[in-house]
Amino acid sequence: MPPGATVSDAGRRGTIDAAVMTLGWNQAGVYSRPAVRILASWRRRPAPPPLVAARYLDHNVPASAVAGAASVVRVVAENTGPALWRRAGAGGDTVALCAFLDGQIVASGSFLADSVGPGETATVAVPLTWRAEPGPHRLKLDLMVTGRTFFSGEGTPPLEIAVTLRPAEDTPTERLRPSLRHNEWFYSPGQGVYRTREGRPAYPLFGQDARGCTIRDVDGREYVDLHMGWGCNLLGYADERVTDAVARSLGSGGIASLVHRGEMEVSEALCGWFGLGDQVLFGKNGSDVTTWAVRAARVATGRKTVIYAGYHGWQDWNAAALGFEATGIPGPPGPAYRFRYADLEGLERAAAQHGSDLAAIMIEPAVAYDGRDPDHDGHRAYLLAAQALARRHGALFVLDEIFTGFRFKRRFAQTFFGLRPDLTCLGKALANGLALSALVGRGDLLRQTVGRVFYAPSNKGEACAFAAARAALEIHRDTDVAAEVWAAGSALRAGVDALSVERGLPSRLVGAPYRMYLGPFEGSLEQRVHARTLVQQELARHGVISHRGYAIVSRRHDGAAIERCLSAYAAALDAVRAAVDHGALHLLDIPDVPEEGPS
């Protein structure tokens, strides 16, 4: 070894000082005794601890699974090293769990918490798809500091598990699954998972048809639906009067060069409810008309800023308030600021800050989940104050009744609360399952802005949707649909709350009876997310479709349907109770279901 050499141990022990090494060599290249003693002493010292270390406490990887199936494996790990583990997106060096199948990396997953400190334990979920080839395979799970090192390189042995894959039985779902490589962008209760970890078909993936409040999947299993097509089917799936009207319209030509008479009839009906001086224009999605409302407000006022509470669609103006770093959209289209529902002080501060540039205040009149609205059916004083605030600042007051419309007492929240917005956005239940949205507003305002707001959707005049809307509006005219829906939702809430009390759980169905949310759950973020995941999973396993804890009922949820729901909720809450007592690891099949935050 020449003078000035260095000694290292896998990059951890560092460099021996060059002066010490030089001291240890004489001109003949032989160690001097002082240097030998120094090096011997250094070699006897224990190696410094690794930068990262873990102990794998448990996992739920099955010994046998179905080849080609989507699954989720989970591992419980303890941080036994000195460094903080950070979740992806939480800043700093991040730690993830990587899955290798037969030596090739196939997936990775992150912890739920932002960080896992030394001595703490956490569960990490890794969604993966098993190989298509049946037979014996080897799964290796190894934690990694992203871009730097695997824990196995730092002295923590990976988990290595033998898994035998068996061929999938032929089912209609299996025959459709290959199409997922072309289109996986849709909701399913199992979040892409069709089978339990052991391989039994359990969770619906593809629908076949729907009637009333039930939906049938392609395997022929029937489910009571507590999602109702994102709330679009308030009258129930395939309502007879709506279906007959659509059938009669099929020969009309669909989208024609002249406006269809149905569009004019629906316009007349809507303005008859809201005000004879109003005008209306149509779209296909709620996002169409909320975006039109924002553009119209900016055109009418010559200002840019919009402040809002609630969810108003997926277009850029709304996504901007989520943070473009989070959405990945490269640049905001204009200033939009979100405030919490019923936070009048926060709204007043935002209006004062942006008053000279304030174009609109947009609000959902009632939200699904927020402690500031304890009854979750609207806050009259706040809504009236928000309307007055918009008027005082010369801004438009926009009410988003896409969800509350036709569900609220007296059909609309604005009617019940005595509001008079400049613009009202409608959708969801308007055509009971067919794609139609509407913006109803002051006639002078629409005449002023329509020609200056670029809005020209090709499909907005499609005749079948107007036939459906006309039939649905007649039903709402003749029947108090909202009262029926509130009665059904109240019965479901009373039953679920009683089941929670029986099991010693704090969760309750909160919210107005037309849109309820199961919560809260107790414990850490991980425990709460696992509880919410179990509810969605076990409801689906026992014949009820839900979405992230929400329960959306329709006119067709009769007593028998409510009883079927309560039976499924009993099984789901039993699973939550078992998770509270013994842990959720061996109960979970599907990906984590995130918590919903306040609106």
Image: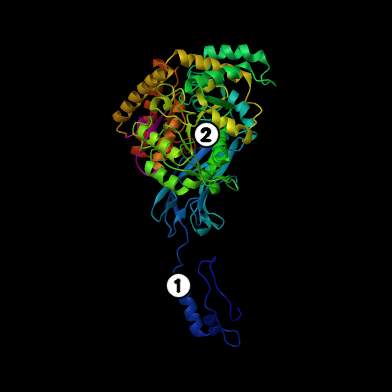
Q: Is mark 2 on a helix, strand or loop?
A: loop
Task: Judge from the rendering whether residue 68 lies leftward or rightward of residue 555; answer left or right.
Answer: right
Q: Name the residue under label 2.
A: 191
Q: Nearer the viewer, mark 1 or mark 2?
A: 2
Q: Which residue is located at x 47 percent, y 75 percent?
A: 42
- The reply to whether residue 233 is visible in this rendering is yes
Q: Residue 12's x, y, as percent? A: 51, 66
Q: Residue 305's x, y, as percent? A: 52, 44
Q: Residue 426's x, y, as percent? A: 51, 27
Magenta-highlighted residues: 506-525
Distance of label 1 from label 2 (alpha carbons): 55 Å
Query: Which part of the image, by quadrant, shows the C terminus?
Result: top left
User: At label 2, which amino acid type do we have?
Assistant: Gln
In front of the other: 461 or 265: 265
In front of the other: 244 or 466: 466
Please tell me how many numbered marks the rendered image carries. Answer: 2
Q: Quadrant of residue 588?
A: top left
Q: Mark 1 points at which residue?
A: 44
Q: Which residue is located at x 42 percent, y 56 percent?
A: 80
